[in-house]
Amino acid sequence: MCTTRIRNSFLKKAARKSKRVPLHKRRRSRIDELAGDDGPDEAVALILETLPGLTRLAERHHLDLLAYLLGMTQMEAEEHLRVRSRRKLS
């Protein structure tokens, strides 16, 4: 009786393995959903919306270097939008 069970297990078809999808393709973050595919100006605008809150959070927890870098990032994003809007007016 034991040999029958063993033989039956060898005769069964192997189960199909599902294709694995990389994690970065499986999940879309909330930011990806908000940003969409509108272009770089919209991405910069979204980043500008989130930076002040992140900067306050870093300052509240005394993460001085991080707060400084976030402030610099905000300045760079504002400059990017300013330059882009100037080009569009020309």
Image (tube, helix red, strand yellow):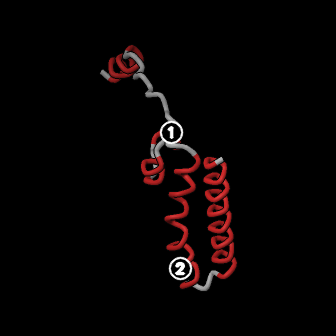
x and y percentages locating residue 13 in the rendered image: 39, 16
| Occupied quadrant, residue 76 | bottom right
| Local crowd size for mark 2, using a 10 Å CA cut-off: few (<14), some (14–19), many (≥20) | some
Q: Nearer the viewer, mark 2 or mark 1?
A: 2
Q: Secondary structure at mark 1?
A: helix
Q: Which mark is residue 56?
A: 2
| Local crowd size for mark 1, using a 10 Å CA cut-off: few (<14), some (14–19), many (≥20) | few
Give the answer, above or below, for where 75 lies relative to 61. above
The kind of residue on which mark 1 rests is: Lys
Report, in whole angstroms, how far the alpha carbon at label 2 lies from the one at label 1.
Answer: 32 Å
The residue labelled by disc 1 is 25
Q: Secondary structure at mark 2?
A: helix
| Occupied quadrant, residue 27 | top left
The answer to whether 79 appears left or right of 60 in the picture is right
x and y percentages locating residue 5 in the rendered image: 33, 22
Q: Nearer the viewer, residue 11 or 6?
A: 11
